[in-house]
Amino acid sequence: MKLYNSIGPNPHVVRMFIAELGLDIETIEMDLMAGENRQEEHLKRNPSGQSPTLELEDGSFLSEITAICEYLDEKQGNTDLMGKTPEERALTRMWTRRVDLQIIEPLTTGFRYSEGLELFKTRMQTIPEAADGLKSIAQEKLAWLDAEMEGKDYICGDRFSLADVMLFCFITFGATVGQSVSEENTNLTSWYDRVKERSSTAA
C-alpha cells in the first residue's frame, strides 16, 4: 500500500491511526500549497482532489479519512480503535460522525472562509461572511462535547478510538488558526493533554 500524504489535519488523522495500528506504509508527499492535489495525475487517484489517498495492493484507490481508517482496522482484524464488537463499532461510528459533522466541519470551513481564504477562494466556493458563524458553532459544540466527556477518559469511554484521533488532530490544527479550545472546557483540555502523551501524535 501507498499513502499519498500532505500537510493538514486530514492526513494527520490517517498517519496517527496508522501509527496506533503499528503499521509501516510507504508515504508519498504531495505539495498542497502548489496545488499538486488538483493536478490530473492525482485527480485520477482521487477525483475530489483531496489528501490523503490510499493506494491499495490491487492498484485501486481509497479516499475519505474515515473509510481509510476503517479499512486499515478491518485488515488488522478489528482493533479497539474501531471496536471489537458490533456494539463498540457502532459507538465509535456514532461519535466519529458527531465529531466530524458538529465540530470538524464548521471549524475547517470557518478557516477556509477566513484565514485560509486566499488559498481556497480559487479552489472552491467560499462564503466569507459565514466564517464567524461557523467558528461560533464549532465552539458551541466543543462546549457540548466537554459536558459529554464528564467522567470519561476518552470519547467512547475507557477505549481510545478513531473519534479521539480525529478530534485530537483537528483541535491541534484549530489552535494554529485561531480556534483554540476554551480553557473553560476542562474535560476536553484534560483529554487533550492525555492524548498528547501518545507517541502516535507525532506521526
Image (cartoon, grey):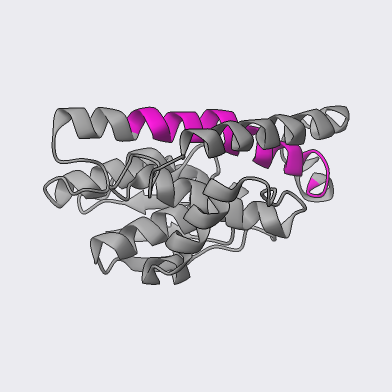
Q: Within the magenta stretch, is there residue 97? A: yes
Q: Nearer the viewer, residue 112 or 162?
A: 162
Tell me if 15 is positioned left or right of 38 in this view.
left
Which image quadrant is residue 89 in?
Answer: top left
Closer to the camera in the image, 126 or 134: 134
Q: Position of residue 59 (x, y in %)?
A: 26, 50
Q: Position of residue 183 (x, y in %)?
A: 68, 52
Q: Is residue 144 magenta?
A: no
Q: Is residue 134 left or right of residue 171?
A: right
What type of secondary structure mainly makes up the magenta span? helix
Instruction: Give the side of residue 100 with respect to residue 159, left or right.
Output: right
Q: Taking the image as drawn, is residue 170 in sight?
A: no
Identified at 44% across, 30% down, the residue is 97
Q: Does residue 193 show up?
A: yes
Q: Tell me where the magenta segment starts and ends, as one range.
A: 93-116
Eyeballing the image, is 85 above or below 198? above
Residue lying at 41% horizontally and 35% vertically, measured from the top left: 96
| Residue name at image x 83 percent, y 34 percent | 132
Judge by depth and name the residue closer to the eye, 2 or 164.
164
Q: Quadrant of the C terminus?
A: bottom left
Task: Identify the residue at image location x=50%, y=37%.
Answer: 47
Vertical position of residue 41 compared to residue 21: above or below: above
